[in-house]
Amino acid sequence: MRLLLQQRPDGHEAPRFVQLMLEPDLLGGWNLVRESGQIGGRSQLKREQYLDQASAVAALEKARDVQLKRGFQLMFAQGSDAPK
């Protein structure tokens, strides 16, 4: 599952983005990968581990909601069970 959120450009600098991805790991757990930064610039990558898919999806939805409140817009959602 993958979500891409982006801020509207203000004309002075490149817009910022946040990408949230859920990936299964080799031990049966799940990783929430957060990538953020300016488009065309450097980005920062963070990983969080969860024991089951339900808690990982809940964390992804919470992270998405926080970014939506900060003014980001959902640009792209991929995955058969992508949260709306």
Image (spheres, rainbow, N blue to C red):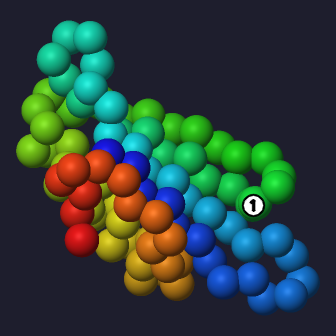
The residue at which mark 1 appears reads as: 38
Q: Is residue 25 above or below residue 40?
A: above
Left or right of 66 on screen, residue 18: right
In which image quadrant can residue 14 be found? Answer: bottom right
> Can residue 59 be seen?
no
Q: Nearer the viewer, residue 15 or 78?
A: 78
Instruction: Quadrant for the C terminus, please.
Output: bottom left
- Looking at the image, how many numbered discs can be counted on the residues? 1
Q: Is residue 19 above or below residue 24?
A: below
Residue type pointed to by label 1: Gln
Q: In the displayed image of the protein, which residue is found farthest to the bottom?
A: 10
Res 33 quadrant in image: top left
Q: Is residue 32 above or below residue 77?
A: above
Badge 1 element:
strand
Quadrant of the rendered image containing residue 31: top left
* Residue at (32% x, 40% y) in the render: 22
Residue 13: horizontal and vertical position, in percent? 86, 76
Question: Which residue, as the protein is rendered here, is positioned at the far right?
Answer: 12
Q: Please give the name of the residue rendered at 49% of the width and 79% of the height, measured from the top-left corner.
A: 73
Residue 7 % position (x, y): 62, 77
Q: Nearer the viewer, residue 84 or 71?
A: 84
Residue 47 visible within the image? yes
Residue shown at the point (48%, 46%) measured from the top left: 34
Q: Dot 1: few (<14), some (14–19), or many (≥20) neighbours within 10 Å?
A: some
Instruction: Residue 36: give x, y in percent of width and height.
Output: 61, 53
Q: Residue 47, position in %: x, y? A: 44, 34
Give the residue at the far top of this rendering: 27
